[in-house]
Image (spheres, helix red, strand yellow):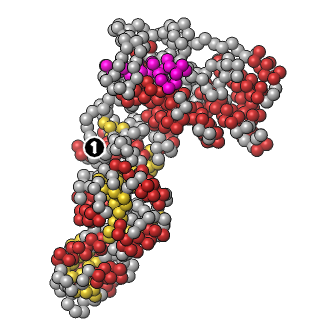
């Protein structure tokens, strides 16, 4: 059977004598094992099985397989699951018997076709992903075939998925080379420079050198590229395998010829070790359980971006679109993208200090597209209630901003600012002019029999300096003095949500907010989908601990989440939760969070999580809290899925002992001596 290992982009001389190897996972310090492509067949060139393989007792399936799904490629006769590496088969062991066999055969077919027809290999890998997308070797096969078929963006996504599933630094060479394939050689060099070579096997260090040298050549830095390779050759230990030395020398020959140094290239080629005939050994860590059950969570998922799933977004203001007088970073661009996708935007706020026109003008000044007829304030909402409870021409003591007083007048009532005469009702809303004297006038009127209304009961108001006193805090003072609670408008009452949706002629709206007690609770009261964003009041930790009645349908970092697909959290039979490209999460005894079996201590130290891992944690925490006590959760910082800081590893949760003498030698890629401009072409 052929050796199914793909060629590196810079792994062979122009004469075609070079041969690449597959990208296996790094095996950690002290290991220099070679590996075939994970999930693909690993046989020597004579077609014999790997040393130590035992014959299977049961008869393997040899016949052609055709799925009922017309999009699934046919598995040819003769492609058998037993040709898959033992450790890769072990990774598939959590699948059902028939599905396990089919997935294994798809992986074997992908390996066989990788160099013959990368497109067919890609189709087989995608079929395996559809059947077993939570198994890391399957996702690695997807990454490798996407890479081999030139789908570099997709390969990058799959590489990151594999890395999150494993919690390690897998496939860095593939990642960097994909950046090269996308014309981003500078980015490839950045990736290379950020790699901790001491954590890689010697073979993987050579992979990184090859990519680094190739990226330098892409930028026209041929001398620099040659120097990187020659320094790596000098650093190779004397007892290094010949195939590693040969691979570096192949690229050295190519660079020498590129530079016109033909005689030197011939001399290096003559001294090159013979191409070895070696067996491939795969070394895998524990694999995630791929089987899922029917357990569901309140956190939902979509097959398309929210801006396509819902026709209208009902957006909160403070903490979502801006912070006091500071615009939310990326907010205008995100909402413009949602508008371009066909989504309508409505704005609703509990802040009663501005009229809808003033709100629209503020939004427009910050770069948003907004008109007054898209804005519903708590004061506007309250006017509808006043008309139902008070006769036209009633006297209303206004405790709030001038715009609130104007709104009261516009709706047919008489607005006053003291309780000297008869007062039918008191309306209290936020306003920077509200002071002790005005609050006292409200108390006088209420104690004299006036009805009491409030635009909202928000205790705090987000500003660019932090959280200021909100209308609810001032209402509390009047309530304490009068023993009367107001009739409140705004969120979390369902009416403001339903009225805003009606105003926008929405058929399938989604509410977007930063507060669980108003934005999310109100959406639930209105039986409306909701998106919680982390740009305002309530934190990720608050969402993790949210009780029923305050749990959002979707979560995101900011309003850009409207333009994203939201993967659905999945519960696995081993008790873990996953979501999209997340790491596996479960809640252990005592409510302790475990991510990839790493416990997160509730010790005050913040933990950085990728967005999808945060979603998986939400599902796990809500499930646990519904059955038991609350979850012990540290402070969390949530970052986009492509931010490597979001991967939880042992190294960033515990102190790692210093490396010992058994660690592999480091092959220099680019150090301080070769980073200066003097080396650039």
Q: How many marks?
A: 1
Which of the 4 image quarters holds residue 418? bottom left
Q: Would you say residue 654 is visible in this rendering?
A: no
Q: Which residue does the image show at 23% across and 58% down from the upper left? A: 525
In the image, 511: left or right of 175?
A: left
Element marked by disc 1: loop
Q: Position of residue 287 (x, y in %)?
A: 41, 27
12 shown above or below 391:
above
Q: Would you say residue 365 is visible in this rendering?
A: yes
In the image, 660: left or right of 264?
A: left
Which of the 4 image quarters holds residue 152? top right
Q: Does the segment drawn in magenta span residue 114?
A: yes
621 shown above or below 536:
above
Q: Which residue does the image show at 70% across and 39% down from the upper left? A: 219
Between residues 617 and 352, which one lies in front from this camera angle?
A: 352
85 shown above or below 322:
above
Segment colored magenta: 98-121
The residue pinned by badge 1 equals 297
Q: Does the segment drawn in magenta span residue 666?
A: no
In the image, 427: left or right of 182?
A: left
In the image, 656: left or right of 262?
A: left
**Could you tell me what secondary structure mostly forms the magenta stretch?**
helix
Q: Which residue does the image show at 49% across and 11% down from the upper left? A: 50
């Amino acid at each position: 059977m052929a050796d199914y290992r793909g060629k590196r982009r810079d792994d062979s001389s122009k004469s075609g004598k070079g041969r690449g190897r597959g990208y296996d996972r790094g095996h950690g310090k002290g290991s220099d094992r070679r590996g075939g492509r994970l999930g693909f067949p690993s046989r020597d060139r004579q077609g014999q099985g790997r040393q130590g393989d035992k014959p299977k007792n049961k008869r393997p399936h040899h016949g052609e397989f055709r799925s009922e799904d017309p999009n699934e490629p046919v598995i040819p006769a003769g492609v058998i699951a037993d040709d898959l590496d033992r450790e890769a088969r072990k990774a598939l062991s959590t699948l059902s018997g028939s599905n396990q066999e089919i997935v294994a055969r798809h992986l074997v077919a992908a390996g066989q076709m990788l160099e013959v027809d990368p497109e067919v290999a890609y189709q087989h890998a995608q079929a395996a992903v559809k059947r077993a997308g939570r198994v890391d070797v399957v996702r690695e096969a997807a990454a490798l075939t996407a890479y081999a078929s030139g789908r570099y963006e997709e390969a990058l996504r799959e590489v990151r998925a594999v890395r999150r599933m494993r919690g390690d630094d897998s496939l860095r060479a593939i990642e960097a080379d994909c950046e090269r394939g996308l014309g981003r050689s500078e980015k490839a060099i950045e990736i290379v420079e950020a790699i901790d070579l001491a954590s890689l096997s010697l073979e993987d260090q050579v992979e990184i050198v090859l990519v680094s040298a190739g990226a330098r050549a892409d930028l026209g830095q041929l001398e620099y590229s040659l120097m990187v390779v020659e320094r790596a050759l000098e650093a190779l230990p004397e007892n290094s395998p010949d195939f590693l030395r040969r691979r570096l020398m192949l690229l050295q020959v190519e660079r020498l010829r590129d530079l016109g140094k033909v005689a030197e290239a011939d001399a290096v080629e003559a001294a090159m070790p013979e191409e070895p005939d070696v067996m491939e050994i795969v070394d895998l860590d524990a694999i995630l359980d791929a089987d899922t059950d029917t357990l569901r969570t309140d956190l939902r998922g979509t097959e398309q971006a929210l801006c396509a799933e819902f026709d209208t977004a009902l957006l909160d203001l403070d903490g979502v679109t801006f912070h006091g007088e500071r615009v939310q970073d990326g907010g205008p661009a995100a909402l413009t993208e949602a508008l371009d996708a066909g989504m309508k935007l409505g704005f609703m706020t509990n802040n009663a200090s501005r009229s809808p026109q003033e709100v629209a003008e503020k939004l427009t000044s910050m770069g948003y597209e907004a008109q007054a007829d898209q804005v519903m304030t708590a004061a506007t909402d309250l006017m509808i209630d006043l008309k139902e409870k008070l006769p036209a021409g009633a006297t209303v003591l206004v405790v709030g901003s001038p715009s609130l007083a104007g709104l009261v007048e516009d709706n047919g009532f008489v607005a006053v600012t003291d309780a000297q005469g008869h007062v039918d009702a008191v309306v209290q809303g936020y306003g920077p002019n509200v002071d002790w004297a005005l609050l006292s006038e409200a108390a006088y009127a209420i104690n004299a029999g006036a009805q009491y209304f409030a635009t909202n009961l928000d205790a705090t108001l987000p500003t660019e300096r932090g959280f200021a006193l909100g209308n609810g805090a001032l209402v509390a003072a009047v309530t304490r003095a009068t023993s009367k609670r107001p009739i409140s408008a705004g969120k979390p009452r369902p009416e403001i949500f339903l009225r805003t949706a009606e105003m926008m002629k929405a058929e399938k709206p989604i509410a977007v907010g930063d507060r669980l007690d108003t934005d999310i609770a109100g959406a639930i009261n209105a039986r409306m989908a909701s998106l919680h964003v982390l740009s305002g009041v309530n934190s990720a930790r608050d969402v993790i601990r949210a009780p029923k009645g305050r749990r959002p349908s979707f979560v995101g970092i900011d309003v850009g989440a409207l333009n994203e697909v939201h993967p659905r959290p999945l519960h696995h039979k081993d008790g873990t939760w996953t979501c999209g490209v997340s790491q596996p999460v479960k809640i252990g005894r005592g409510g302790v969070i475990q991510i990839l079996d790493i416990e997160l201590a509730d010790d005050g130290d913040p933990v950085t999580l990728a967005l999808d891992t945060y979603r998986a944690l939400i599902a796990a925490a809500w499930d646990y809290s519904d059955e038991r006590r609350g979850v012990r959760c540290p402070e969390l910082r949530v970052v986009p899925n492509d931010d490597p800081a979001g991967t939880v590893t042992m190294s960033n949760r515990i102190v790692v002992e210093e490396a010992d003498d058994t660690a592999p030698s480091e092959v220099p890629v680019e150090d301080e001596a070769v980073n200066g401009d003097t080396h650039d072409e």
